[in-house]
Image (cartoon, rainbow, N blue to C red):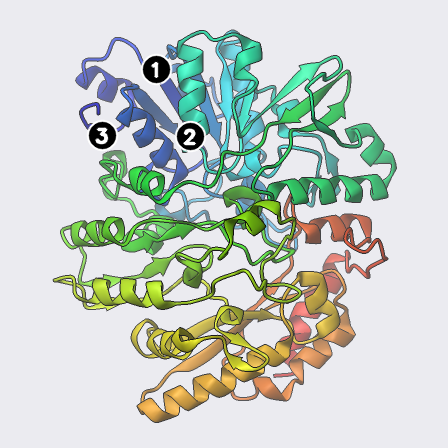
Amino acid sequence: MAEAYMIPTSVKEVEKLGWDWIDVILFSGDAFVDHPSFGTAVIARWLQKWGYRVAVVPQPNWRDDLRDFRKLGRPRLYFGVNAGAMDSMVNHYTASKRLRSDDAYTPDGRAGARPDYAVSVYTRILKQLYPDVPVVIGGIEASLRRLTHYDYWKDCLMPSVLVSSGADWLCYGMGERPMLELTRAIEADRKPSDMRRIPQLAFRMSGRCRTEGAVFLHSYECCLKDKKAFAENFNIIETAANMLNPPVLVEPVGDGYVQVNPSYPPATQEEMDSFWDLPYTKLPHPRYKGHRIPAYDMIKFSVTTHRGCFGGCNFCTIAAHQGKFIQSRSEDSIIREIRDMTSLPGFAGNISDVGAPTANMYGMRGRDPELCARCRRQSCLFPAPCRNMDRSHERLLRLYSRIASVKGIRHAYIGSGIRYDLFLDEKGYVDDSSEAYLKELILEHTSGRLKVAPEHTEDNVLRLMAKPSFALFERLRGEFDRIVARSGRKCELVPYFISAHPGCGMREMEKLSRNKALRGLYMDQVQDFTPTPMTVSSVMFYSGIDPKSGKSVFVERDIEGKRRQKSFFFKKH
């Protein structure tokens, strides 16, 4: 493994390292924080581990003479580009399409440090300045825009970001393995035809695709003319994203096509550990001394336990980016990170989050792997939990016990979301570990409020969200109240809801606001639905069609109507 160093971001820092070349230069829409919760740091440290010299240009100025794009010169291998930890349009605009006044991923929360559609803007500039240097795009913005997608902010279908950006390669999902293989391939000057077989990459080609066994989608142009074609495309794309052994996908566009190769298999526990066993400082880059990065403040004392989510919510992009199958770190790896955390500046013994997309999916998998390999379900929980899924929380409880025994740890909170349908069903607790988990979660791992997300109360809306019946939340509230009453402690249950989701009108919001099961609860957690690329819900929003059933769906597209839905809730409480 190469000697660890602080990833350079300037000419002076490169010169201090004595480098006369840089292998890979990464451009990012975020400030550079050397923490595993930030994808730029993960890829930089991962490539560093394998001996590559990596530099980062965070939040380059795209408005001036482009000096930020020139300052480090030409890399030996390629440029990498991402928009940051969020899609730049979600980062910039509210669900009402109003410009946000701050940016949590920028020093001091300052807005305006990245452009709209940052991946395309950065890539076009680099292609203009260095037309012969490959550009590889990745991160959440590129990943979820890898094929034809609905863009809420332009209110239209857009082609793959490979078309709008002109990038040579797109790495989707979690990028350690594909990026390492691609880096080695570029370094070895492998044949383009050979490189086009690398898993988890997408690329654009002219002419007709002749890839054997590929699944062909409707063309971008066909989707523009026919909303049903777009909905049909999405069904195929989503099914492939949820498969253990997906096919190659090909989508014609213009005089050529975009090809999306199958993803790597889910990372093993050993591979997951290796992604975290890297020399992160866990700090913002020294260039930000004296400045606060709000997103870092939120996660600096957090620990990620796993990747992936098999919940399959229709409005969520997690499975499309991280995958459906849970990829867990070992308990030893997590404990090592926590022990190291105790020496970080400002750490007072409180871990803000031991979690992941869904905190209580840690270690969960199907009992029979062969059944999982053949499965095509979007969700392992909806419309009913899969009988093959092992929902035991025993391993998670053992992990919590080990964390509590680490010297210097006072509290380990669970800030990530939890799925209560993992431990409750219509009959009660799922298994012997379920009640013990809920009790420990409430009494030991919250700071006084347990936040959960029923999302709505009305079954017709919940079905379109792919969420369980609200009756399950009512059962959760009963168990919560019983545990809190017996403990003598003060603790609140805080439900989250979504307004203006496809299928939801004023009638549904009125019923939500009057639901008796919500009386006495802290009720200000209502989020206006934002259609984000590559979700079932965004397809419904654009097309007015449920892509699963083909039936028409009511959609509130008027901005004022969306505002009324959200504000109505508060008027009734």
Q: Compute the Cα span from label 1 to label 2.
A: 17 Å
Between discs 1 and 2, the one toward the N terminus: 1
Residue at disc 2, secondary structure: helix
Residue under pointer 1: 23
User: Residue 324 versus residue 551: which sits nearer the camera?
Assistant: 324
Determine contact: label 3, label 2, CB under 8 Å. Answer: no
Circle 1 residues within 10 Å: few <14, some 14–19, many ≥20:
some
Does the image show residue 61? no
The one nearer the camera, 295 or 324, is: 324
Q: Quadrant of the N terminus?
A: top left
Q: Residues within 10 Å of mark 3 (few under 14, many from 20)?
A: some
The tag on residue 177 is 2
Camera-side residue of 407 and 242: 242
Can see residue 559? yes
Q: Residue at x 81, y 35 (%)?
A: 223
Amino acid type, mark 1: Asp
For label 3, the residue is 6
For residue 432, what is the image quadrant?
bottom left
Left or right of residue 295, residue 521 in this image: right
Mark sitting on residue 134: none
Label 2 sits on what residue type?
Arg
Q: Mark 2: few, some, or many residues within 10 Å (few <14, many ≥20)?
A: many
